[in-house]
Image (cartoon, rainbow, N blue to C red):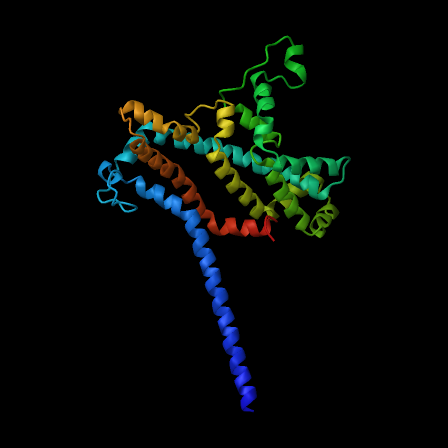
Amino acid sequence: MRSETSRNTRGRIISGTKSWLLALLRWALIIGVSYVIVSPLLGVAARSFFSNTDQFNPMVYMIPQTPTLERYQVALKVMSYASVLPRNLLFVGGLAVIQAIVCSMVGYGFARFRFPLKGLLFGCLIIMIVMPSHVIMLPLYMLFQRFDPLGIVTRLGLTPPNLLASPWPMYIMTVFGAGLRSGLYIYIFTQFFRGLPKEIEEAAEIDGAGAFYTYLRVMLPNAIPSALTVLIFSVVWQFNDKFYAQLFSISPRIVLSKQISGLQASVSNLYQLRDPSLTTLYLYAGVMLAIVPLLVLYVILQRRFIEGVERSGIVG
């Protein structure tokens, strides 16, 4: 009797020890990963408040002794933040909405319809996801430098327009399902629509609904979690994009990321600062100003975003 009791006690102790060690390991991993991700951001945020004295004081590491908002005041002025940010959000928001609509239609087609070369086209979609943008950089530049699809403009005796230095290349690519990360978004919608029961469409078909009506009134409302996920991803990636903005020479007046890339040089020229360690502080302030809208967006949509990620087929 005593030996059985001692064995049960020993088993509980071993089980409790294992649970405690697993919990300790889990928290160590969480803290370690969080430190690697958050530590650079905290460093940038802290240094954006550094004064000149703090910057040259070796005893100051993270917390400034004489904090100042002068870096933010200069960054707001040099970046024309108050005028550029609304234009950038309008530009990015328009692209995100178009991308969500187009990619959901294409994803629904891949998930529910049979058509010739479907497997080949889906393979091209996968290649589109993994292929670096730099591979098609030159063809895209040449395409929009003399935009003449199928030679129609030349046959009409007109001069092909140069769409560079305008946002039109981004809109055209997005409308035709070839925008920034569109391949990934199409895949997300495809996986989500495949997971929906076919009985929903069969019931709509019995009621006399056509394919487009079924997509618009039945399937798309059920895909709101995936649509929200795509919208958030699209806004974040479009907002942070600098590759296409530089490739197509889009005006810095509507692209905040280009304002940040030139902030350090602008401050150096306007205020005659030749010390890179000081101009970097203004760059940090500009980076924090660019991060704030995304943080606000995430805080507002955090719950729905996580739900969308779980239901869209990205994980699991």
Quick check: 56 left or right of 39?
left
Quick check: 34 left or right of 197?
left
Q: Residue at x 74, y 39 (%)?
A: 119
* 8 relative to 224, above or below: below
Asked which quadrant contains residue 5, the reply is bottom right
Tell me where residue 16 appears, x and y as whole percent.
49, 73
Residue at the extreme bottom: 1
Residue at the extreme front: 58
Q: Residue at x 59, y 19 (%)?
A: 142
Tell me where residue 313 appears, x and y as whole percent.
61, 49
Asked which quadrant contains residue 210, the reply is top right
Q: Nearer the viewer, residue 223 or 119?
A: 119
Q: From the image, which quarter does the N terminus lie in?
A: bottom right
Tell me where residue 314 appears, x and y as whole percent.
59, 48
How many marks can you see?
Answer: 0
* 83 relative to 300, above or below: above
Q: Which of 276 and 250 is in front in this view?
A: 276
Residue at the extreme right: 116
Q: Residue at x 48, y 25 (%)?
A: 246
Asked which quadrant contains residue 156, the reply is top right
Q: Is residue 212 visible?
A: yes
Q: Nearer the viewer, residue 137 or 53?
A: 53
Q: Is residue 79 visible?
A: no
Tell me where residue 177 appears, x and y as whole percent.
62, 32
